[in-house]
């Protein structure tokens, strides 16, 4: 951590002295933990997902719905021991799993906690991330993560640079996804609850459905296919008003084009009903 290289920003910051590209220092910064009922059905189930939200993020998405914690760094610093306590609290409340949300910049500390306590936990562990990952960091998690739940946001470097400040997004996300699939090549669901595997989420953006179609074709070409979750919940927030082309909600035409292409390609997974394009399911930070 004296020269942080956990995410593709490779900022090299000594986070004990100054924040990294993620905006965070050396300590684990917790935004919120809760049982979350708004995930895919096989993740939330009936008792909810044991969601642990971390502050900070290596991506700077202008439309981020969790901006108070990703950009604003709202939260509190906790110890690895406190993180372990939270995991067991959520499990004891009945959560089907433990989901680490945007934890890439704490991957070394999370791996340490899981190495010590995972065998006692007894429920699946999820790595819920923005897809912008280093393969070497993911290898640190090999054997500790049961379910990978990455976003796959963009194929176009122009879009990823414009909206997330990451022109190399797909260049990094593609090998990262392959590493996730190497670790968890089989999707296993028992009694409606996922036990291991990979679900790739994709949020369709206004005026960008053609980029989405290209991503679906990339997913269909993979030797091991993940499940795919096509999201239509985009709603303009945070800095979207500065970008006229995305300062509106998604149309049914745009969303349906992507879902239809998934069906043509034989991809399996999840879609969202019309009317979810709001912040109702965004946690109150």
Image (cartoon, rainbow, N blue to C red):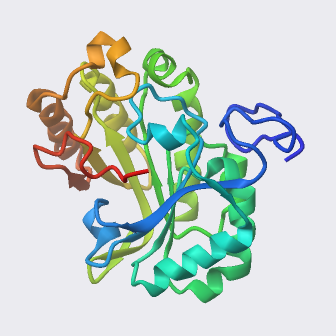
Q: Residue at x 11, y 43 (%)?
A: 275
Which is more toward the observer, 240 or 137? 240
Q: Is residue 148 left or right of residue 201?
A: right
Give x and y (percent) for residue 188: 38, 74
Q: How many marks?
A: 0
Name which residue lies at 82% across and 35% down: 18
Q: Where is residue 11, by image quadrant? A: top right
Q: Is residue 172 above or below residue 143?
A: above
From this view, report whether residue 90 is shown above or below residue 29.
Answer: below
Q: Residue 50 appears at what percent x and percent y?
A: 44, 71
* x, y percent for residue 103: 60, 53
Q: Horizontally, is 174 left or right of 281 in the view?
A: right
Relative image position of residue 15 (x, y in whole percent):
81, 41
In this orientation, does residue 30 appear?
yes
Relative horizontal placement of residue 81, taking residue 213 as reference (left or right)? right
Q: Is residue 51 visible?
A: no
* Rendered position, 251 above or below 178: above
Please tell me which residue is depicted at 27% across the width and 83% down the height of the picture: 191
Given residues 218 and 235, the one toward you in this image is 235
- Residue lying at the far right of the rendered structure: 2
For image coordinates 15% across by 32% down, the residue present is 257
């Amino acid at each position: 951590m004296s020269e942080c290289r956990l995410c593709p920003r490779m900022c090299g910051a000594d986070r004990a002295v100054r924040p990294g590209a993620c905006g965070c220092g050396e300590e684990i910064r917790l935004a919120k933990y809760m049982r979350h009922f708004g995930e895919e059905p096989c993740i939330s189930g009936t008792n909810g997902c044991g969601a642990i939200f971390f502050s900070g993020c290596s991506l700077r998405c202008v439309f981020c719905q969790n901006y108070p914690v990703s950009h604003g760094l709202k939260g509190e610093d906790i110890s690895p021991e406190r993180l372990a306590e939270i995991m067991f609290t959520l499990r004891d409340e009945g959560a089907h799993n433990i989901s680490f949300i945007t934890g890439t910049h704490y991957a070394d500390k999370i791996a340490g906690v899981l190495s010590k306590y995972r065998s006692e936990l007894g429920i699946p562990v999820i790595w819920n991330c923005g897809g912008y990952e280093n393969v070497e960091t993911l290898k640190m998690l090999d054997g500790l993560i049961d379910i990978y739940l990455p976003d796959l946001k963009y194929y176009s470097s122009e879009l990823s640079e414009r909206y997330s400040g990451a022109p190399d997004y797909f260049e990094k996300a593609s090998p990262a996804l392959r590493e996730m699939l190497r670790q968890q090549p089989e999707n296993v669901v028992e009694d409606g609850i996922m036990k291991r595997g990979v679900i790739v989420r994709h949020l369709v953006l206004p005026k960008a459905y053609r980029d989405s179609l290209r991503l679906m074709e990339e997913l269909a070409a993979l030797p091991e296919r993940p499940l795919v979750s096509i999201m239509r919940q985009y709603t303009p927030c945070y800095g979207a008003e500065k970008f006229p082309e995305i300062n509106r909600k998604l149309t049914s035409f745009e969303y349906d084009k992507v879902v239809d292409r998934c069906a043509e390609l034989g991809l399996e997974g999840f879609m969202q009903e019309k009317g979810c394009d709001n912040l109702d399911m965004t946690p109150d930070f």
